[in-house]
Image: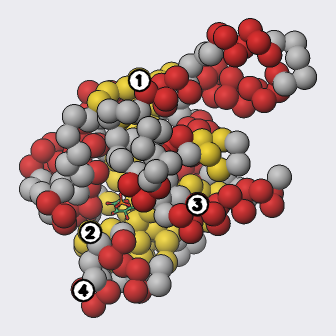
Amino acid sequence: MKNVIKKCLFPAAGYGTRFLPATKAMPKEMLPVLTKPLIQYGVEEAISAGLDTMAIVTGRGKRAIEDHFDISYELEHQIKGSAKEHYLTEIRAVIDRCTFSYTRQIEMKGLGHAILTGETLIGEEPFAVILADDLCYSEGPSVLAQMKKVYEKYNCCVVAIEEIPKEHTNRYGVIAGHLVDSSDDTYRVETMVEKPEPQDAPSNLAIIGRYILTPDIFDVIRETKPGKGGEIQITDALLQMAKQGKVIAYKFKGKRFDCGSVEGFVEATNHFYTLN
Ligand code: G1P
């Protein structure tokens, strides 16, 4: 098995119903925080961690994502040499630095199923997963770059976690484990539950949309029965790995914005606007 992480999977087939009507004809991943679509922030984070192969699991109505990570000859021609050319600098740099491949998820059967759909683009190597609607910001190394270091130390699956108010546990996968190294905030995961009610939650440590997975996860997902909401949950598959001591949870340094909710989206917009 190759050990270097080069590929990043982006599950991007979801409907984005919480942003209707904006997402009726536009992928939720293309919603901009200031002038940049959410998925571009994700791709830039992957690049910052040294990854160069983006694997995107799309669905119907998501063609704008493919067009975004491509050259628009008409546009290039129009603004070439003009004062507006710099507006394309960032996206050109992204396109130059990595490759993009796509596969379609035909039916929405949960995050675990979306990740399994991406197997054809990943193959037999460890890979990262970014959920673009969790937008992460950090003053130092990016969250994925931090996680890659953790992976290099432990050589097993890594999930990013943060402390949340106990009343919000039913929005996340929640873990419990024991601290293995307080200097790098890592826990060996013992149990994990998808969206438990507060009274059933094993802790207030929630998984956010950043994962590093080893390719043996695919066989485990294949064996995973539908769980919460009748969907195939990555949390349930990872629980099987955790039982063999193969999952580390890492309390990342930085800030996460839940851009899957209107409040989180507004918060992210304000945050990035103030930075500018
Ligand atoms: C998914 C996962 C959940 C995780 C969350 C992070 O849920 O199923 O375990 O905590 O992403 O954003 P979703 O937000 O897609 O419902």
| Residue denoted by label 3 | 265
Quarter holding ligand 1 = bottom left
In the foreground, 152 or 195: 195
Q: For disc 2, does the CB lie below 8 Å from ligand 1? A: yes
**Which residue shows up at 41% across the image and 33% down it?**
62
Q: Quadrant of residue 178 in the image?
A: bottom left
- Tell me the CA gap for discs 2 and 4: 11 Å
Q: Amino acid at mark 4?
A: Asp
- State the residue lying farthest toward the front: 21
In the foreground, 213 or 2: 213
Pointer 4 and pointer 3: residues touching (CB < 8 Å)? no
When the figure is inspected, residue 219 is found, relative to residue 124, above or below; the finding is below
Number of other residues with Cα within 10 Å of mark 1, as a class: few under 14, some 14 to 19, many 20 or more: some
Q: Assign a secondary structure to mark 1.
A: strand
| Res. 200 mark | 4
| Residue denoted by label 1 | 101
- State the residue lying farthest toward the right: 83
| Res. 194 mark | 2
Q: Amino acid at mark 2?
A: Glu
- Side of 153 where 155 appears, left or right: left
